[in-house]
Amino acid sequence: QVQLVESGGGLVQAGGSLRLSCTTSGRTFSSYSMGWFRQAPGKEREIIAAISRCGGNKYYTDSVTGRFTISRDNAKNTVYLQMNSLDAGDTAVYYCAARTRTYYSTTPHDYNYWGQGTQVTVAS
């Protein structure tokens, strides 16, 4: 069983930055494509960013393009989400997810493992 643990969430002022980390257990992290999702109260879970197994292909949803950066360190079994220029619309619970395929998907249903989520709150 693969376990994913997110960290780095918290309260930040609008315009500020946070870096989320997601560390996985096991020795097969490099075989997973990874995604970051978020879910705000009363809304569906949405894709934010995703990265292929080797890190060569990345995806960003339009609302975060130019502000967020996804990266991974396969030696540390960790995927990161650097979030800059945060605004109140970014407030949500953020989840990382692992998919047992080379390439990422933008659909939550396509991911095999999920973290417990970390709260990000942006104060305006």
Image (cartoon, rainbow, N blue to C red):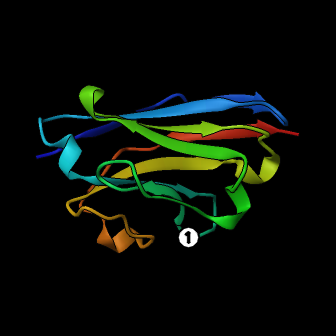
Give the x, y percent position of residue 22: 39, 36
Tell me which residue sits at (71%, 50%) in the image: 90
Q: Is residue 25 above or below residue 31?
A: above
Give the camera-side residue of 124 and 70.
70
Residue at 72% from the left image edge and 37% from the top image edge: 84
Where residue 116 sits in the image (x, y, percent)?
Answer: 37, 44
Front residue of 92 and 47:
47
Task: Using the rendered view, name the quadrant where residue 72 is placed.
Answer: top left
Taking 14 as reference, is 38 left or right?
A: left
Instruction: Please state, as top left, top right, bottom left or bottom right, where the C terminus lies in the image.
Output: top right
* Apparent side of residue 99 relative to residue 94 in the rendered image (left or right): left
Q: Which residue has dot 1 on it?
A: 44
Q: Position of residue 36 (x, y in %)?
A: 47, 52
Amino acid carrying mark 1 in the image: Glu
Q: Residue farthest to the right? A: 124
Residue at position x 40%, y 52% from top? 56
Q: Is residue 14 above or below residue 113?
A: above
